[in-house]
Amino acid sequence: MSTPTTTPTTLQPAQHARPAEVPTPAGVDTHCPYCALQCGMTLRPPAEAGALPEVVERTAFPVNRGALCGKGRTSPEVLSAAVRLTGPLVRGADGELAPASWDEALDRVAAGLLRVRAAHGRDAVGVFGGGGLTNEKAYALGKFARVVLRTSQIDYNGRFCMSSAAAAHQRAFGLDRGLPFPLADVARTGCVILVGSNLADTMPPALRYLTELRDSGGTLIVIDPRRTRTAEQADLHLQPRPGTDLALALGLLHLVVAEGRLDEDFIAARTSGWEQALPGVMAHWPELVERITGVPVPQLRQAVAMFCDAAESMVLTARGPEQQAKGTDTVSAWINLCLATGRAGRPLSGYGCLTGQGNGQGGREHGQKADQLPGYRKLDDPAARAHVAGVWGVDPDDLPGPGRSAYELLDTLGGDIRALLLMGSNPVVSAPRAAHVAERIAALDFLAVCDVVLSETAAMADVVLPVTQWAEETGTTTNLEGRVVLRRKAVDPPPGVRSDLEVLGALAGRLGWEQGFPADPEEVFDELRRASEGGPADYSGISYARIAAEDGVFWPCPRRPSDATAAPGAPGAVDSPGTPRLFLDRFATPDGRARFTPVQDRPSAEEPSADFPYYLTTGRVLAQYQSGAQTRRVRELNEAAPGPFVQLHPRLADRLGVAEGDPLAVTSRRGRAVAPARVSAAIRPDTVFMPFHWPGSGRANTVTNPALDPTSRMPEFKVCAVRVERASDVR
């Protein structure tokens, strides 16, 4: 595959040439542990023994330029020994978790995995990772699964993040990177269509780019069933029914064709497949799309005019359109809109996905995903297997094939999969049909969990291994732009805590692999570079020193050796400058052309009915993050968002006889959640909303639908049919 080229020098993001930053009394430059912005921050050492480090603005980092949300500001709170694990726990004969030594805990894990493998085969052992793991840990976990355990059964919770957008990227562009341009370009385009994202709550420091866009004369279109704080910033807010984003995108493209707004020169020169995609587009005329989506035709026409009249435009999608059983096709429809109007493969235009998890991008690039090897190589590609096996020192034939996707893996626990090693995830809260997932986890013969805190999932484990977290270890992550950044160790962990890399090395040794799993993250990263070399996500030209000197390096970044024998980073190797902007000269397809994807609208996996007459959609709130395992341990964040709620329209509240704060039951075919009512005209009358950060009776994912996208295997978190009642009326 040819490497996408960089943009002209005049459009390069600002580079700050300076020596690698090192810890000083003033603090350690690092990055926030939460979302995919990976905001830069400085941690200042505590003023006295036993205190926590202080977060200081780091204005030089170009992504957030010093801005931090409340989660970032309070992130040191989770470093406190009062809220986190400080020693291993082992379940005793009485069924309770009790403190244990590291040797006892590691021996128990190794014995449990070996026992299940001996009785039921290699694929009876599963591995489940997390989108918050550093690149080094994600790489080592994938290698451990395939080399030490030799199991095909590995996936990660990043499957629930942007897998639909990734699949659509691959089939349109031949390469998947969340944003194919730096985030700063968003402020410099002419019009942005933001689909299913509430940046004001999920990535607050990024909201400034939309503000700067409008201040410079650009326009913002927000598509969301709710009038969120982000939608309030928009020049135009389209409020479709949940699950109808595909029809909406097709309807907008229909109007582009009907109004003669196609960029026919771009279509002819840089794309293929338009004739095959056109019939599906023309089948979605404006009046039909209005009936499907609830968006009036005049608003559809206004959106097309705003998007096409701007000299440059972008479409940015997030979990709203992606977390659907038709999410891949939905994203493809939005990409088709960009291609048909020439809004791709040129500066300040294009399609991008706003990755959610801190390392959702890097976590799948380097081996946690069921069908991928490091460097975004396909596991069923013989050449890819040979390359990675050579780096690992194993026979390519010994590597297992592709395994189950995340939900399918969880659904098989206690059946085909009898033991699970879980690292950095909390599926008891975060997975769809969560009560069923909890039952499957309880049915396992053996469960080992590596985590920072005793999450709801860790509390069910046979062995819990306490591991270091962001400020206690060094490692790289890859943010939503494809910028590889370096988190630096700023404080020492408690004495009873070890890094995930140390854990994997110790387990590998107990399972017969004395070499190949070092604890030094830079040593792991150097191996990752070799394993990724020549792959779509090529990191071989990136080093810790380069990242520190350049405020991150954009992949793909291949080394360009003047000496063919030179190792990555060696004196004879001349490394690429990185690729801030993809596709300016050609797309990463065999012929260099972007590909239109023929798509047709179809109903959601579950539509409202007489018994379940309303839509449920889910999402995040500003003060909590993902399953809440860490943020729910921070006092300030809990005061701001103390628990779950059900947002509903005043007309629906009147119909149900519900007042603000009344307990409300939301019931689907899978279960029931109960939470206080929050009455608001910001939501459609036919829809209710629940945040998904909490366990217990208000757990939104008790209700959500695990129906899977046939391509990405993404569950349909964002839409299901529910019944809504006062909790006192439920018998």
Image (cartoon, rainbow, N blue to C red):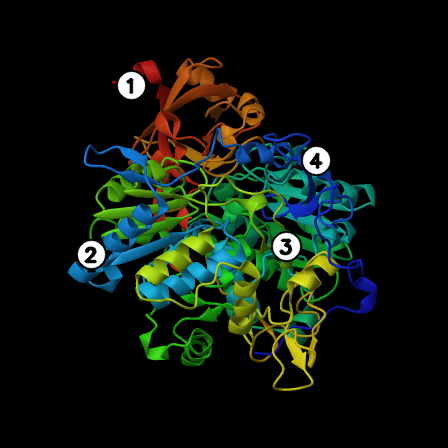
Q: Which label is found at residue 486? A: 3
Q: Are the residues flagged by discs 2 and 3 in contact, CB closer than 8 Å? A: no
Question: Element under label 4?
Answer: helix
The amino acid sitting under disc 3 is: Leu
Give the residue drawn at x 51%, y 63%: 365
Mark 2 Cα-neighbour bin, 10 Å: few <14, some 14–19, many ≥20:
some
Q: Residue tagged by mark 4?
A: 233
Dot 1 or dot 4: first in sequence order is: 4
> 11 or 370: which is nearer to us?
370
Q: Which label is found at residue 115? A: 2
**How far is disc 3 from disc 1 in space, using C-alphas?**
51 Å
Q: Which label is found at residue 730? A: 1
Question: Element under label 1?
Answer: loop
> 306 or 320: which is nearer to us?
320
Circle 4 or circle 3, nearest the eye: 3
Residue 634 placement (x, y as % from top left): 54, 28
**How far is disc 1 from disc 4 in space, using C-alphas?**
39 Å
Q: Are the residues flagged by discs 4 and 3 in contact, CB closer than 8 Å? A: no
Q: Is residue 596 visible?
A: no
Q: Is residue 291 visible?
A: yes
Label tally = 4
Residue 74: name its quadrant.
top right
Residue 159 placement (x, y as % from top left): 44, 53
**How far is disc 2 from disc 4 in space, using C-alphas?**
57 Å
